[in-house]
Image (cartoon, rainbow, N blue to C red):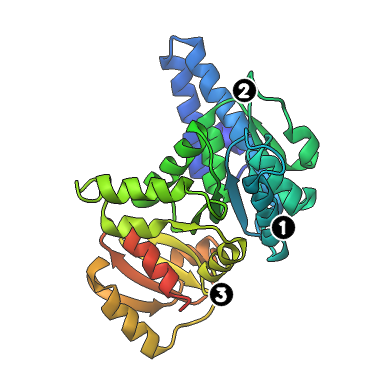
Amino acid sequence: MLAVVEAASLRRDEDLLTDMVATVVKIAKESADRGDVKIVNTALRELRQSYLTFAPFRGRRKASIFGSARIAPNSASYLAAEEMGAALAAAGWMVITGGGPGIMTAGVEGAGRDNAFGITIRLPFEPPAAQTIVERDHLVRFRYFFTRKLTFMKESSAYVVFPGGFGTLDETFELLTLMQTGKEPPSPVLLFEPEGETYWATWLEFVIRELVPAGLVAPADLSLVTVTSSVEDSVAEIVAFYENYHSMRWVDDQLVLRLERPLSEARLAELRVEFADIIDHGTLEPIPPFPVEIEDEDEVDRPRLALRFDNRQFARLTQLVRALSR
């Protein structure tokens, strides 16, 4: 397997690439079903295309806008999504939508074609609107929902969710599940309903009334979302989330939080007390880059904090990230 990688003159991530080639060979040897092989092949091709599409824009943060394809133009939700896209673009963000009609088109129209991506799914009952609403090099077409969802989560730093049907709720619940379990890093999630409507307020009431008392959702998990009817407040919350927090990375058993600027000793002391409950042992400490971060050239010039996170209270971790900018 290594010989194949070396023959292609691939030196970076040689260990991972060798393992990938070995996995492909094992699938070929062990799978008796051509359909299984086709799924793997298509998934890899889709992910490769998504990586190529987003690679030139790694330096700009992006917000995903979810919502129904069936929302009519000029409806309150449509107009708000258009306003949201424009406000995000004005704040320097790019927008990702599903590339279809309704809320998706509204978000792109607001942000502008140069500031928007369409990641579409092939459906027999919806027109391929994305090829007309985004630039060709900002478009990725998917066959599978799982690769499309992975792209949404991988490329987004914030989420704005408008009212929608099963698909919108599916995306919302999966997003919250991933954040609740630590499979997706902390990010702002805004559940937007136009003034006077109760779509998300009713949803949140159900969660509070039925799920929290039964112990199915922790009270802290409610902090993963914000129900809002204000475009201005939504964008302000998104921007504030990243005012000082940049990113995170695990290094062995330590969680590293990379920052835009160092915290004062007084603020650090406050955070140590406020979030002691999520630290397994030790405390929240400023540190230099770990050797592996230096080797990977991974944000080495940024100040950073490290903690031994308990790996359970991910909603509280999101609260800590928000607190870094206060």
Image position of 186 (left or right of 147): left
Residue 18 in percent (x, y) is at 50, 36
Q: Residue at x 29, y 66 (%)?
A: 308
Circles 2 and 3: CB distance less than 8 Å?
Answer: no
Q: Residue furthest left?
A: 214
Residue 186 in percent (x, y) is at 44, 58
Of tags 2 and 3, the one toward the viewer is 2
Q: Nearer the viewer, residue 181 or 173?
A: 173
Residue identified by numbered label 3: 301
Q: Amino acid at mark 3?
A: Asp
Crowding near pointer 1: few (<14 within 10 Å), some, many (20+)? many
Q: Residue at x 53, y 30 (%)?
A: 145
Crowding near pointer 3: few (<14 within 10 Å), some, many (20+)? few
Residue identified by numbered label 2: 123
Above/below status of 171 relative to 80: above
Mark 2 to mark 3 CA distance (whole Å): 45 Å
